[in-house]
Amino acid sequence: MFEVATTSAAGTKAVAAAVAVEVRAGDLLVLAGDLGAGKTAFTQGLGAALGVDARITSPTFTLAQRYEGRLRVHHLDVYRLSGPEEAADLDIADLLEDEAVTVIEWGDTIRAALPADFLEVRFTLGEGDDERALTFTAVGSRWATRLPLLTAALDEVGAC
């Protein structure tokens, strides 16, 4: 587990671009934390770094969106779900078998429905209007083995 600080939406996107260097097809990123803390901005930065040209918006009402890039991005927002039992309709297992990376905003609310391997990115509001702390936690072996590479990539970005 480690933490990165950002001071702007552009900084959050830069952090996500550094994460994009380490993502692989079949990866799951679970974004958790405060409302308005930058989960969608993170997904926008990740998508842009993966070659997504389309405008990435929060799929709060549609629940899921798919974007094409050099690696497909499945973007889910489960804020409106009442719990893990409702997540069955999302077919998360099928999304993870696709040649894509899957990003789930508010994914911690359906943790019981998630597979054992994912990278959690927890967003916490800071003191200033645009200050954020992003805490990265590898859950399972898939991300644990890449955590040193991810840490190094994020060290290069520094505080944003």
Image (cartoon, rainbow, N blue to C red):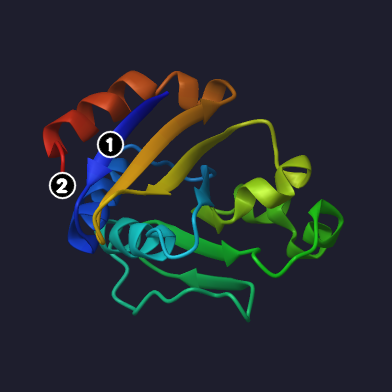
Observer-nearest residue: 33 or 151? 33
User: For the point 70% across and 54% down, which residue is it?
Assistant: 92
Q: Is residue 101 left or right of residue 84?
A: left
Q: Could you tell me which secondary element the residue under label 2 belongs to?
A: loop
Q: Are marks 1 and 2 in contact (CB under 8 Å)?
A: yes
User: For the point 75% across and 65% down, which residue is it?
Assistant: 81
**Amino acid at dot 2:** Cys
Residue under pointer 2: 160
Residue farthest along the front direction in this orientation? 127
Q: Could you tell me which secondary element the residue under label 1 belongs to?
A: strand
At which x and y percent is residue 122? Answer: 47, 43
**Between discs 1 and 2, the one toward the N terminus:** 1
Task: Note whether residue 70 is visible.
Answer: no
In the displayed structure, 76 sits above or below 155; it is: below
Residue farthest along the right direction in this orientation? 85
Q: Is residue 148 left or right of residue 105?
A: left
Residue under pointer 1: 4
At which x and y percent is residue 117? Answer: 61, 32
Q: Quadrant of residue 115?
A: top right
Observer-nearest residue: 10 or 53? 10
Give the distance between the C-alpha atoms of the residues marked 1 and 2, in whole angstroms: 8 Å
Q: Which mark is residue 47?
A: none
**Amino acid at dot 1:** Val
Task: Note whether residue 58 is visible.
Answer: yes
User: For the point 80% across and 63% down, which residue is it?
Assistant: 82
In the displayed structure, 53 sits above or below 33; it is: below
At which x and y percent is residue 65? Answer: 54, 73
- Quarter of the image that includes the N terminus: top left
